[in-house]
Image: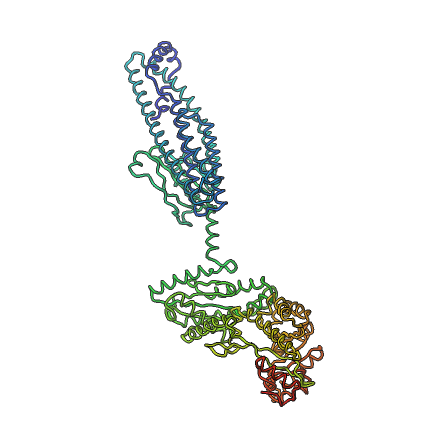
Amino acid sequence: MRISERYASVSKLEVGSFLIILLAGILFGYFVYDKTGFVDESESLALLQDQRDISIIISTLESINQTFAIEINNQSVTARQRIIDAISTAAEKVATLKKNSPGSSKDEKRRIFSVAEPVLQDIRTWLTKGTEQHAPDSILAFELSTQRLKSALAELREEQDWLNEKQERTISAYHSQLEGFRGSVLTLLLGTISLIILVISLNMKQRQTQTKLAAERKLISDSVNNLDEGIVLTDKDDHCLVINETLGRLCPNLNAKLAIGKSFEDAFARSISREELRLIEIQTHHLIENNAAENGANINETPREYLTESGIYLRVTKRSTKNTGHIITFSDITYLKMAQKQLHHQATKDGLTGLANRNHFINKLDEAISRSKRFGHKVALLLFDLDKFKQVNDTLGHAVGDELLISVANRIQDNLREIDVSSRMGGDEFAAFLDQIKDIREVRITADRIIQHLHQKLEIDGIDIEVSASIGIALYPDDADNLNALLKHADSACYQAKQMGRNNYQIYNRDMKVRAMQQMTMESRLRNALTDNNLSLKYQPQLNLANNTITGMEAFLRWNDPKLGNVRPDHFIPLAEKTGLIAEIGEWVIRQACQQIRSWIDQNQSPVQVAINISPRQFRLQNLPIIIDKALKDFSISPAMLALEITESVIMSDLHAAVETLKELGNRGLTLVIDDFGVGSSSIYRLKELPIHALKIDQSFIKDLHKSEDAREITGAIIAIAQKLHLKTIAEGVETAEQCEILRELGCDTIQGYYLQKPISALELHNLLLEKQNFAVGQTKH
């Protein structure tokens, strides 16, 4: 029973009885009270004050320790600043406690605050200025700070244990003295009168103490309410005694007034959504050994995380002592959870499409292969390469290109199962794997469905866009026994799909591996072709039909490899385009042609114009005009001696950019020719806007001139259009005298082909030009 309860009935004695025995009671009561020597309540209150101070300081330092745990792997300037700010706030709290707390003695006060203040100052110094040997952002500064903080917490907990024991001794002494006082009074004749006097005196003193305690309780309450964390103080039976205002904001469904006196579980049953979200254990704290716990030492339970029904993530930490009760801290970690989710998304997802990124996809594929080994099912890998995406991206802009990629990603994902995984591997390359496959039919069905779905028209910004893809498929373990081999074989199948005309899928077979090895060998040797001097130019003369004179020639690139022999241009030029080698090779062709023109001029040969083909990738290079300028300057060649042939499809793929490039080249005095005219998609209206000088009629029309009326009419129409636009015409692929005469009749300006001369070396052409300047048709070399 408490002191106030023990003497509650005594304090109700009639005042009259008290007045009768007042005089004797005062004398005897004073004597007994003075000799008994009750413990001074102020000492007990000071102990309570010290316990409150040290508890708040420990809570503050543990909060900083949790901040260190969160930021230990993120030792950035921002992380360090957050820790420094937390330390500054903690230092202010400690300073306030020091100022407002008298303590049981000056020595006791110094012991409590001399531990907390230096550790906060040291950590702040290490994080802002560093140690003498290390910079502030070093790992050592973080480790020193953590060790220093843990050491201080251990010292403070020892001091707290000492205060708890001291309080228990004080209370025990107080009770013993009270029992002695009561025994003495009962043995005395005037015990009753003196007891009444003493009880009234004690009651008055107790009321004074209660007033002081109420003031102290208000001070503690105000301090607790100003904390950033939610705080609940409970007794040892887990009944709520104090709930601060911060917790009310963190748990809007909590009625703090009604919760007082209730068990912790009942008070928070409506605030923490137990049904919807699972309990998560995130961090294990060191627990005090069981024998220490039995002696009343502090016990830190493992922090747990909850999500309130209002959507706030809370980390709940419970600190307990054997005799006094529990302090439960609620920390708002919503921002941390959101940051963790964002970091996880950034680490695993493609930023544009939301599909798995390359690394995450490879990890998931590796896991699927491991499962396949255990359970015996198959895994199918599909690699997608969008057909002509670059053309769409360059023509319509990156914004439309991005929308196209997003649509493609959605269409691929829509045709997969939940257990399958899709990815954007980079650029316009996508991938997917089908898990738990039993046979190839499942894969074929999925691939057919994806191709059909992809090929449906898309409308982006009012523009209808057709999409198609080449898909390569490889199965584990049928086609490969490891992850890398599976990726390589799917890539080989994808390459084969592109070679087969695109908008199809190909399943890997062993022949593809042979072709892939051949392709790799060709690519490797092509990279060395320039340095090994294995590339050369052949020249085919162009004949002016009006006067039978050679007015120009076209340069053809040839590759004679020591191991591969003469490699056909239609084999190695697409490879050069794909690998990017075409830029370097194209520059070599320009310089080689200019060098040869210079050589012929130095040999006093009548100069003739040399035409060179510009590849699609080379035409899109921004530095193409600069490369040409440098070659012309280095070899002192007039721009009029050089003609550039660009295919119709390249120009029409991005008309606006092509016109600007053609203008820039034409302004230099170069002759510009549209190559393979007639097989592209240009219109007469657009044609007249192009700054060009000639049209080269595609040989597909020339070869059928003598046997197809349609071919003759189309060729005649092209020549007529060119004449209307004041453009010259060149017919390529002329192989017979009959074709030559028909072209002469139709008004064609220039012809070239095997009827005149096959492509020959510069030396052979030089001898040919020396032999005769005028060509009699039908008497030229074949």
> x, y (%) of residue 42?
40, 22
User: Which of the 4 quarters of the picture holds residue 41?
Assistant: top left
726 horizontally vs 418: left or right: right
Q: Nearer the viewer, residue 564 or 571?
A: 564
Q: How many marks?
A: 0
736 horizontally vs 416: left or right: right
Q: Nearer the viewer, residue 321 or 609?
A: 609
Q: How are the colours assigned in the image?
A: rainbow
- Residue 681 visible in the current orientation: no
Q: Nearer the viewer, residue 590 or 474?
A: 590
Q: Residue furthest top?
A: 23
> x, y (%) of residue 32?
33, 14
Q: Nearer the viewer, residue 459 or 764?
A: 764
> x, y (%) of residue 285?
36, 42
The relative height of residue 679 versus residue 393 in the rendered view (above or below) is below
- Residue 175 visible in the current orientation: yes
> x, y (%) of residue 230?
45, 39
Looking at the image, which residue is at 45% across and 69% down? Answer: 491
Quadrant for the C terminus in the image = bottom right
The relative height of residue 391 versus residue 309 in the rendered view (above or below) is below
Q: Residue furthest front?
A: 603
Looking at the image, which residue is at 33% across and 28% down? Answer: 168
Looking at the image, which residue is at 52% across and 65% down? Answer: 428
Q: Residue furthest left?
A: 187
Quadrant for the N terminus in the image = top left
